[in-house]
């Protein structure tokens, strides 16, 4: 069975959805590590509570990004991690890290990429006045929120929606979509050709 790590910087509601999908047998892989760059992340608590190993490293304890990532990679390789799932990990991975896991890093972003990249995807779509919003699961490459798209789903923004109600709906959608995309990856059903990802 493949082993994977989830990287999360904050609340970890996507992590929770993934934990449940693993428990239910919908994702047939072992969630072997939860990593955070923020030792206060609630995501770490969620993992600890059910006995999933955790690791937290503070970037500011390192002289540069690469030495931080080098330590992280050593840890991942020691634990035979096959692939990495970013779930609210708010740090751009360097080409060094990405080369260690080519086409083996997945990310979820709370917008319909390529619109509204960056940290505030939901707010940016809402304040722009969009009538439709959504979520994107994609492979990670060297550019931010840019790799080949695995899955997207959308929802309508109604006039009565507030940023809070939209945020809640987007999170609910993420929790449905991300486990499905991870399951397809685990089952080797994603065929990547350039930017196109076909589902086998
Ligand atoms: C999620 O909405 C995720 O899509 C977003 O952070 C949130 C984390 O929530 N990620 C990004 O914006 C990445 N650019 P969570 O910690 O409750 O899963």
Image (tube, rainbow, N blue to C red):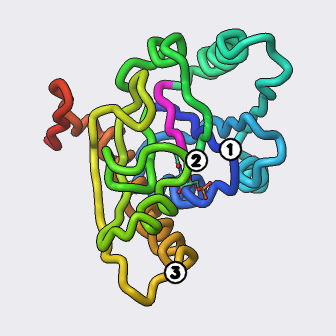
- Residue where numbered disc 1 is placed: 9
Label 3: how many Cα within 10 Å (few below 14, some 14–19, many 20+): few
Q: Which label lies toward us, 3 or 2?
A: 3
Horizontal and vertical percent for residue 16?
A: 60, 59
- Mark 2 or mark 1: which comes first in sequence? 1
Q: In this rendering, is residue 102 above or below 169?
A: above
Q: In this rendering, is residue 196 above or below 26?
A: above
- The quarter holding residue 55 reads top right
Q: Which label lies toward us, 1 or 3?
A: 3
Tell whether 148 sits left or right of 167.
Answer: left
Q: What stretch of residues is rendered in magenta?
A: 82-87
Identify the residue at image location x=65%, y=11%. 66
Q: Is mark 2 within 8 Å of ligand 1?
A: yes
Farthest residue in the front direction?
A: 128
Evaluate whether residue 1 shows in this view.
Answer: no
Quadrant where the N terminus lies?
A: top left
Q: Are marks 2 and 1 in contact (CB under 8 Å)?
A: yes
Which numbered tag is attached to residue 88? 2
SS category of the residue bearing label 3: loop
Tell whether 175 sits left or right of 146.
Answer: right
Q: Is mark 1 within 8 Å of ligand 1?
A: yes
Horizontal and vertical percent for residue 82?
A: 48, 25
- Residue where numbered disc 3 is placed: 162
Identify the residue at image location x=53%, y=74%. 163
Tell whether 115 sits left or right of 41.
Answer: left
Q: Main secondary structure of the magenta part?
A: strand
- The quarter holding residue 106 reads top left
Structural distance between the alpha carbons of marks 3 and 2? 22 Å
Structural distance between the alpha carbons of marks 1 and 3? 25 Å
């Amino acid at each position: 069975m493949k082993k994977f790590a989830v990287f999360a910087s904050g609340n970890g509601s996507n992590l929770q959805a993934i934990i449940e999908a693993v428990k239910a047998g919908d994702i047939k892989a072992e969630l072997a590590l939860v990593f955070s760059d923020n030792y206060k992340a609630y995501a770490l608590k969620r993992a600890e509570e059910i006995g999933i190993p955790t690791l937290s490293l503070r970037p500011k304890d390192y002289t540069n990004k690469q030495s931080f990532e080098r330590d992280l990679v050593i840890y991942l390789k020691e634990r035979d991690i096959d692939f990495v799932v970013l779930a609210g990990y708010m740090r751009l991975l360097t080409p060094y890290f990405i080369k260690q896991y080519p086409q083996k890093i997945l990310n979820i972003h709370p917008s319909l990429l390529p619109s509204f990249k960056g940290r505030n995807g939901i707010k940016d779509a809402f304040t722009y006045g969009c009538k439709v919003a959504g979520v994107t699961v994609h492979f990670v490459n060297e550019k931010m929120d840019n790799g080949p798209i695995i899955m997207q789903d959308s929802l309508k923004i109604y006039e009565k929606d507030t940023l809070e109600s939209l945020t809640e709906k987007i999170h609910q959608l993420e929790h449905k979509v991300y486990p499905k995309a991870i399951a397809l990856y685990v089952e080797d059903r994603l065929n990547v050709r350039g930017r196109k990802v076909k589902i086998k």
